[in-house]
Image: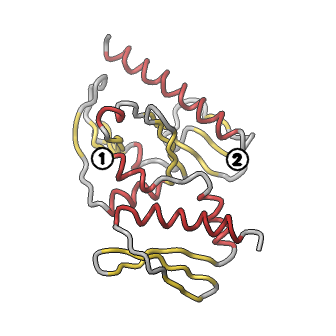
Amino acid sequence: MTKDNTFKRDLEAGKVYEKKALEVIQKKYPLAHEIEGYCKEWDIFIPEIGEGVEVKSDQKSKHTGNIVIEIEFNGKPSALSTTKAKFWVIYDGDNWIWFLVEDIKRCIKDNNLSYATFTAKGDTKSKKAYLIKKETLYQYQVLPEFYKAFKWAEENRIRVYPVKRGSKFILALEENGYVKTSGKEYEKKEIDLKQKEYYIYLYKNFKDV
Protein backbone atom coordinates (compact mmCIF):
# COMPACT_ATOMS: atom_id res chain seq x y z
CA MET A 1 0.00 0.00 0.00
CA THR A 2 1.41 3.42 -0.96
CA LYS A 3 1.80 6.26 1.54
CA ASP A 4 -0.99 8.19 -0.25
CA ASN A 5 -3.33 5.24 0.10
CA THR A 6 -2.39 4.84 3.77
CA PHE A 7 -3.14 8.52 4.41
CA LYS A 8 -6.49 8.25 2.64
CA ARG A 9 -7.37 5.12 4.62
CA ASP A 10 -6.46 6.80 7.92
CA LEU A 11 -8.45 9.90 6.99
CA GLU A 12 -11.54 7.84 6.16
CA ALA A 13 -11.16 5.85 9.39
CA GLY A 14 -10.91 9.11 11.32
CA LYS A 15 -14.23 10.28 9.87
CA VAL A 16 -15.85 7.02 10.95
CA TYR A 17 -14.76 7.57 14.56
CA GLU A 18 -15.89 11.20 14.44
CA LYS A 19 -19.37 10.08 13.39
CA LYS A 20 -19.50 7.48 16.17
CA ALA A 21 -18.45 10.07 18.75
CA LEU A 22 -21.01 12.52 17.34
CA GLU A 23 -23.81 9.98 17.77
CA VAL A 24 -22.98 9.73 21.47
CA ILE A 25 -22.72 13.51 21.92
CA GLN A 26 -26.02 14.19 20.12
CA LYS A 27 -27.92 12.11 22.66
CA LYS A 28 -27.30 14.96 25.11
CA TYR A 29 -26.64 17.84 22.70
CA PRO A 30 -28.80 17.40 19.57
CA LEU A 31 -27.31 20.45 17.80
CA ALA A 32 -23.76 19.08 17.90
CA HIS A 33 -22.28 18.68 14.42
CA GLU A 34 -19.11 17.77 12.55
CA ILE A 35 -17.00 20.53 11.04
CA GLU A 36 -16.88 20.31 7.26
CA GLY A 37 -13.42 20.30 5.67
CA TYR A 38 -10.13 20.67 7.52
CA CYS A 39 -10.22 22.33 10.93
CA LYS A 40 -7.18 22.11 13.22
CA GLU A 41 -9.09 23.56 16.19
CA TRP A 42 -11.67 20.76 16.60
CA ASP A 43 -13.68 18.06 14.79
CA ILE A 44 -17.09 18.52 16.43
CA PHE A 45 -18.76 21.67 17.71
CA ILE A 46 -21.45 21.71 20.42
CA PRO A 47 -23.52 24.92 20.10
CA GLU A 48 -25.43 24.27 23.33
CA ILE A 49 -22.29 24.79 25.42
CA GLY A 50 -20.16 26.65 22.88
CA GLU A 51 -17.34 24.10 23.00
CA GLY A 52 -15.42 21.99 20.50
CA VAL A 53 -14.35 18.33 20.65
CA GLU A 54 -11.43 16.64 18.93
CA VAL A 55 -11.73 12.93 18.18
CA LYS A 56 -8.66 10.69 18.21
CA SER A 57 -8.15 6.98 17.59
CA ASP A 58 -5.19 5.02 18.93
CA GLN A 59 -6.04 1.35 18.60
CA LYS A 60 -2.35 0.42 18.56
CA SER A 61 -2.38 1.30 22.24
CA LYS A 62 -3.98 -2.12 22.84
CA HIS A 63 -0.56 -3.57 22.00
CA THR A 64 1.86 -0.78 22.97
CA GLY A 65 0.15 0.32 26.18
CA ASN A 66 0.81 3.94 25.17
CA ILE A 67 -1.45 6.72 23.92
CA VAL A 68 0.22 8.97 21.34
CA ILE A 69 -0.32 12.69 21.98
CA GLU A 70 1.10 14.64 19.05
CA ILE A 71 2.43 18.18 19.48
CA GLU A 72 4.33 18.85 16.24
CA PHE A 73 4.33 17.57 12.64
CA ASN A 74 6.86 18.43 9.95
CA GLY A 75 8.40 21.10 12.14
CA LYS A 76 5.10 22.89 12.79
CA PRO A 77 2.90 22.91 15.92
CA SER A 78 -0.01 20.48 15.64
CA ALA A 79 -2.66 18.56 17.59
CA LEU A 80 -2.27 19.34 21.31
CA SER A 81 -0.24 22.47 20.50
CA THR A 82 -2.89 24.00 18.22
CA THR A 83 -6.21 22.61 19.42
CA LYS A 84 -8.85 25.06 20.62
CA ALA A 85 -11.15 22.22 21.70
CA LYS A 86 -12.35 21.96 25.29
CA PHE A 87 -12.45 18.15 25.10
CA TRP A 88 -10.52 15.35 23.45
CA VAL A 89 -12.15 11.93 23.13
CA ILE A 90 -9.78 9.06 22.37
CA TYR A 91 -10.87 5.64 21.11
CA ASP A 92 -8.33 3.07 22.32
CA GLY A 93 -9.77 0.08 20.51
CA ASP A 94 -12.07 -0.87 23.37
CA ASN A 95 -13.41 2.30 24.95
CA TRP A 96 -14.04 5.99 24.36
CA ILE A 97 -12.03 7.96 26.92
CA TRP A 98 -12.89 11.62 27.49
CA PHE A 99 -10.43 14.29 28.60
CA LEU A 100 -10.40 18.00 29.22
CA VAL A 101 -7.52 19.28 27.07
CA GLU A 102 -6.14 21.15 30.07
CA ASP A 103 -5.96 17.85 31.97
CA ILE A 104 -3.89 16.18 29.22
CA LYS A 105 -1.45 19.07 29.46
CA ARG A 106 -1.47 18.78 33.25
CA CYS A 107 -0.72 15.05 33.00
CA ILE A 108 2.36 15.83 30.92
CA LYS A 109 3.52 18.48 33.39
CA ASP A 110 2.72 16.54 36.56
CA ASN A 111 4.67 13.51 35.38
CA ASN A 112 7.60 15.40 33.82
CA LEU A 113 7.11 13.60 30.51
CA SER A 114 9.40 14.04 27.51
CA TYR A 115 8.31 13.84 23.89
CA ALA A 116 9.70 11.48 21.27
CA THR A 117 10.54 12.32 17.65
CA PHE A 118 9.66 9.72 15.01
CA THR A 119 8.11 9.13 11.60
CA ALA A 120 4.92 7.12 11.87
CA LYS A 121 3.96 4.40 9.42
CA GLY A 122 2.29 6.02 6.40
CA ASP A 123 3.89 9.42 7.04
CA THR A 124 6.73 11.00 5.09
CA LYS A 125 7.52 13.65 7.69
CA SER A 126 8.54 13.29 11.32
CA LYS A 127 6.44 14.25 14.31
CA LYS A 128 6.96 15.01 17.95
CA ALA A 129 4.61 13.31 20.38
CA TYR A 130 4.29 12.17 23.95
CA LEU A 131 3.91 8.41 24.36
CA ILE A 132 1.90 8.29 27.57
CA LYS A 133 1.22 5.07 29.44
CA LYS A 134 -2.51 4.38 29.61
CA GLU A 135 -2.46 3.90 33.37
CA THR A 136 -0.89 7.35 33.71
CA LEU A 137 -3.07 9.27 31.25
CA TYR A 138 -6.33 7.61 32.29
CA GLN A 139 -5.94 8.99 35.80
CA TYR A 140 -6.82 12.34 34.20
CA GLN A 141 -9.91 11.28 32.27
CA VAL A 142 -13.26 12.98 32.60
CA LEU A 143 -15.54 10.58 34.43
CA PRO A 144 -19.07 10.43 32.95
CA GLU A 145 -20.60 12.70 35.58
CA PHE A 146 -17.60 14.82 36.51
CA TYR A 147 -18.23 17.82 34.26
CA LYS A 148 -21.79 18.19 35.56
CA ALA A 149 -20.61 17.74 39.16
CA PHE A 150 -17.82 20.30 38.75
CA LYS A 151 -20.22 22.91 37.32
CA TRP A 152 -22.62 22.32 40.22
CA ALA A 153 -19.75 22.74 42.71
CA GLU A 154 -18.64 26.00 41.10
CA GLU A 155 -22.16 27.40 41.29
CA ASN A 156 -22.33 26.50 44.98
CA ARG A 157 -18.88 27.82 45.90
CA ILE A 158 -17.53 24.34 46.59
CA ARG A 159 -13.98 23.38 45.73
CA VAL A 160 -12.06 20.13 46.13
CA TYR A 161 -8.30 20.24 45.78
CA PRO A 162 -5.21 18.20 46.73
CA VAL A 163 -2.91 19.17 49.61
CA LYS A 164 0.57 17.68 49.85
CA ARG A 165 1.40 15.82 53.07
CA GLY A 166 4.97 14.57 53.00
CA SER A 167 5.35 12.46 49.87
CA LYS A 168 1.59 11.87 49.59
CA PHE A 169 -1.60 13.90 49.23
CA ILE A 170 -4.88 14.42 51.05
CA LEU A 171 -8.07 16.07 49.76
CA ALA A 172 -9.31 19.43 50.98
CA LEU A 173 -12.96 20.49 50.75
CA GLU A 174 -13.64 24.24 50.69
CA GLU A 175 -17.23 25.45 51.01
CA ASN A 176 -18.12 29.11 51.31
CA GLY A 177 -14.65 29.90 52.61
CA TYR A 178 -14.48 27.08 55.17
CA VAL A 179 -11.92 24.32 54.61
CA LYS A 180 -11.99 20.71 55.84
CA THR A 181 -9.42 18.03 55.04
CA SER A 182 -9.65 14.28 54.80
CA GLY A 183 -7.33 12.03 56.74
CA LYS A 184 -6.82 9.51 53.97
CA GLU A 185 -3.56 9.75 52.05
CA TYR A 186 -3.15 9.10 48.32
CA GLU A 187 -0.23 8.61 45.97
CA LYS A 188 0.47 11.33 43.40
CA LYS A 189 -0.62 9.05 40.54
CA GLU A 190 -4.10 8.52 42.01
CA ILE A 191 -4.97 11.89 43.58
CA ASP A 192 -6.44 13.40 40.40
CA LEU A 193 -8.91 10.55 39.94
CA LYS A 194 -9.85 10.61 43.65
CA GLN A 195 -10.50 14.35 43.40
CA LYS A 196 -12.92 13.83 40.50
CA GLU A 197 -14.64 10.94 42.27
CA TYR A 198 -15.20 13.15 45.32
CA TYR A 199 -16.78 15.89 43.20
CA ILE A 200 -19.18 13.28 41.82
CA TYR A 201 -19.91 11.95 45.33
CA LEU A 202 -20.78 15.46 46.56
CA TYR A 203 -22.97 16.13 43.55
CA LYS A 204 -24.91 12.87 43.89
CA ASN A 205 -25.48 13.26 47.62
CA PHE A 206 -26.00 17.00 48.07
CA LYS A 207 -27.32 18.50 44.81
CA ASP A 208 -30.92 18.32 46.04
CA VAL A 209 -30.23 19.45 49.58
Q: Dot 2: what SS?
A: loop
Question: Which residue type carries mark 2?
Answer: Pro
- Binning the other alpha carbons within 10 Å of mark 2 as few (below 14), some (14 to 19) or many (20 upward) gives few
Q: Position of residue 12 (x, y in %)?
A: 49, 21
Q: Residue at x 36, y 50 (%)?
A: 135
Q: Is residue 144 above or below residue 123?
A: below
Closer to viewer: mark 2 or mark 1: 1
Question: Which residue type carries mark 1?
Answer: Tyr
Q: Position of residue 145 (x, y in %)?
A: 62, 55
In the image, is 165 to the left or to the right of 196? left
Q: Which quarter of the rendering shows the C terminus?
A: bottom right
Q: Residue at x 59, y 35 (%)?
A: 21
State the residue in front, 158 or 202. Answer: 202
Residue closest to the far front: 184
- Binning the other alpha carbons within 10 Å of mark 1 as few (below 14), some (14 to 19) or many (20 upward) gives some
Q: Position of residue 208 (x, y in %)?
A: 77, 69
State the residue in front, 178 or 87. Answer: 178
Q: Give me the C-alpha separation between circle 2 and circle 1.
A: 31 Å
Q: Residue at x 60, y 39 (%)?
A: 44
Q: Position of residue 18 (x, y in %)?
A: 56, 32
Q: Residue at x 35, y 62 (%)?
A: 189
Q: Which quarter of the rendering shows the N terminus?
A: top left
State the residue in front, 45 or 142. Answer: 142
Circle number at residue 47: 2
Sequence-wise, which precedes: disc 2 or disc 1?
A: 2
In the image, is 186 to the left or to the right of 64? right
Circle number at residue 130: 1
In the image, is 34 to the left or to the right of 15? right
